[in-house]
Image: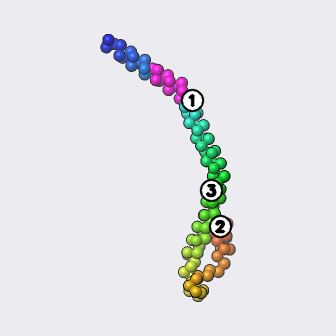
Amino acid sequence: MNSLFPNILDLLLKALKDFINSNLLGIILFFLFLIIVWLLIRELLTWYWKINKIVSILEKIEVGVDFLATNADQNSKGQEKDGAVFIEKPIEEVRSQESNK
């Protein structure tokens, strides 16, 4: 009876190896297909909800805020009126910085 167990174990290991070898390509192709479908659906959803456009607008706002923060101290010395800081021509400079990127 002891000789029966190694034979069963060998048969099970051989069956497992055959299963992996025969279906491994199918499994890999299936997961590759799922990844491609996921990427396509993700791209369609970001296009539909305009997420890419929102991100680009937020990046432009960030550039403008950074510009205002760096130039606020320089321009506040002689241009304060009612506690507000007025910056000369910030939009043109921000646009020129965006075109340089």
Please say whether residue 17 is one of the residues in the magenta stretch.
yes
Whichever of labels 2 and 3 marks the residue nearer the N terminus, that label is: 3
Q: Nearer the viewer, residue 83 or 87?
A: 83
Which badge, 1 or 3, is on the more N-terminal residue?
Answer: 1
Q: Residue at x 58, y 34 (%)?
A: 30
In this picture, which residue range is highlighted in magenta? Answer: 14-24
Type of the residue with mark 1? Gly
Mark 1 or 3: the one toward you: 3
Label 2 sits on residue:
98
Q: How is the image coloured?
A: rainbow
- Residue at image position (63%, 45%) is 41
Image location of residue 46, percent across then percent down? 63, 52
Residue pictured at 59% horizontal, 73% vertical: 67
Looking at numbered disc 2 in the image, what kind of residue is underneath it?
Answer: Glu
Kindly report the distance in space between the C-alpha atoms of the residues bearing marks 2 and 1.
48 Å
Kind of element beneath mark 2: helix
Give coordinates of residue 73: x percent, y percent. 54, 80
Q: Amino acid at mark 3?
A: Ile
Question: Is residue 50 rendered to the left or right of residue 6?
Answer: right
User: Which-is-in-front pick, marks 2 and 3?
Assistant: 3
Q: Position of residue 90 (x, y in %)?
A: 64, 76
Spatial CA distance of label 1 from label 3 is: 35 Å
Q: Is residue 27 above or below residue 68?
A: above
